Image (cartoon, rainbow, N blue to C red):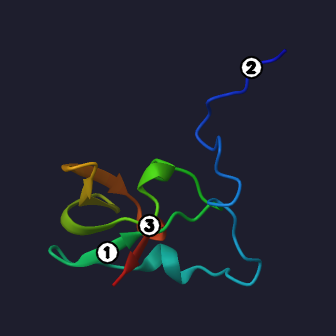
Amino acid sequence: MARFGHGVRSKTRKKLTKDYKKQGITKYLRKFKIGEKVAIKIDPSSQNFPHPRYHGLIGEVINTRGRSYVIKVKAGGTYKTIISTPEHIKKL
């Protein structure tokens, strides 16, 4: 019997699906300020997304790295820093 893979998109059939009506380019051009509250919402149509376990968590923008943002998120009782591009972040 074959063993299943452990790739980036494994076990995310429902989590990483996209409605066919939600398309556009404006999500790539969004800007966030430091200290702003954001939610991590993974866009499956683009690569370089955070790990799917952080999908839906709320955090705070603490820094920028080029076009990406550094987000501080509380996960599992500790604070994690996640680096993500603007298409995977939603303003609250």
Question: Sequence-wise, which precedes: disc 2 or disc 1?
Answer: 2
- Per the image, the residue denoted by label 2 is 3
The quadrant of the image that shows the C terminus is bottom left
Q: Nearer the viewer, mark 2 or mark 1?
A: 2
Which residue has dot 1 on it? 38
In percent of the image, x 65 and y 62: which residue is there? 45
Q: How crowded is the residue under tag 3: few (<14 C-alpha within 10 Å), some, or many (20+)?
A: some
Marks 3 and 1, Cα distance to the nearest angstrom?
Answer: 10 Å
Q: Are marks 3 and 2 in contact (CB under 8 Å)?
A: no
Residue 63, percent from left and from top:
18, 62
Q: Secondary structure at mark 2?
A: loop
In this view, the residue in front, 40 or 4, is 4
The picture places residue 21, in percent across and down from the top left corner, at 74, 84
The residue indicated by pointer 3 is 56
In the displayed structure, does residue 85 sit left or right of residue 32?
right
Amino acid type indicated by mark 1: Val
Residue 37: image quadrant is bottom left
| Secondary-structure class at tag 3 | loop
Give whichever of discs 3 and 1 has the lower sequence position: 1
